[in-house]
Amino acid sequence: MNPLYKQYQIKFSDFRLTDDQFDHPSLLHGIMHTYRVMVHTLKLGLITGKIKETRNSFFAAYIHDMARSHDGYCTRHGTDAANLKLPAYRSLFHENGATNDDILVIGKAVTMHSIGREVPREDADWLSVALLKDADALDRIRLGEDDLDTTFLRLPETHTLIEFGKQLFTHSQLQKTDDFVGLLNLSEEI
């Protein structure tokens, strides 16, 4: 594993997912999608150098789709995840470096990821929200080759990861791994 990931001070092996953590277990918005969004978040953090914001976005990515009740268009599942899932994983996030203030930012990022509006750039939490939204967008390849509209990406750094996003999706489909650390290690080969 890339030694740069150590700067996040996250015990990645703690972030294993099972279908029963999701209200609507799904191939579209389930475990592997979540793992890929988590990888994209970490990659964006390495590029931007924003470790604290990235760590918060990584925690948000872990729960961002857990409260979905279906796979269709939905603006509510982020709020539901912040209200229903964040309390259940709060101690896990604390054990991995999140402060009480960070928990609020994580909840905001999860809530905002599914809402059609943007957080203003002047907002202190803008980057944490933007990192999650862009990381989630990078996995839109799973919906079709041309499903990612790059004009919606918030960070210039995200544009440099589009090809990586495509390759990560393809590799994760071919080499089934059922744990985050396995996918993170696989991402290093791309």
Image (cartoon, rainbow, N blue to C red):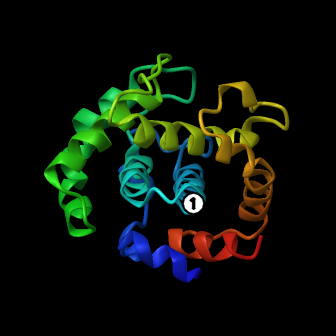
Residue 132 x, y percent position in the rendering: 49, 42
Query: In the image, 7: left or right of 131?
Result: left
Residue 135 is situated, as x and y percent measured from the top left of the image, at: 58, 45
Q: Secondary structure at mark 1?
A: helix
- x 55%, y 43%: residue: 26
- Work out whether residue 65 can be spotted: no
Q: Amino acid at mark 1?
A: Val
Residue, disc 1: 39
Q: Residue at x 66, y 26 (%)?
A: 152
Quarter of the picture holding the C terminus: bottom right
Residue found 36% across the figure and 57% down from its top: 52
Q: Residues within 10 Å of mark 1 (few under 14, many from 20)?
A: many
Residue 185 drawn at (x, y percent):
62, 77
Res 10 → quadrant: bottom left
Q: Quadrant of the N terminus?
A: bottom right
Q: Is residue 100 visible?
A: yes
Find residue 75 and report its horizontal and vertical position in percent.
Answer: 45, 19
Q: How many marks?
A: 1
Residue farthest top in this picture: 117
Side of 167 relative to 113 (left or right): right
At horizontal 47% and vertical 26% (from top left) the residue drawn is 114
The residue most toward the right is: 145
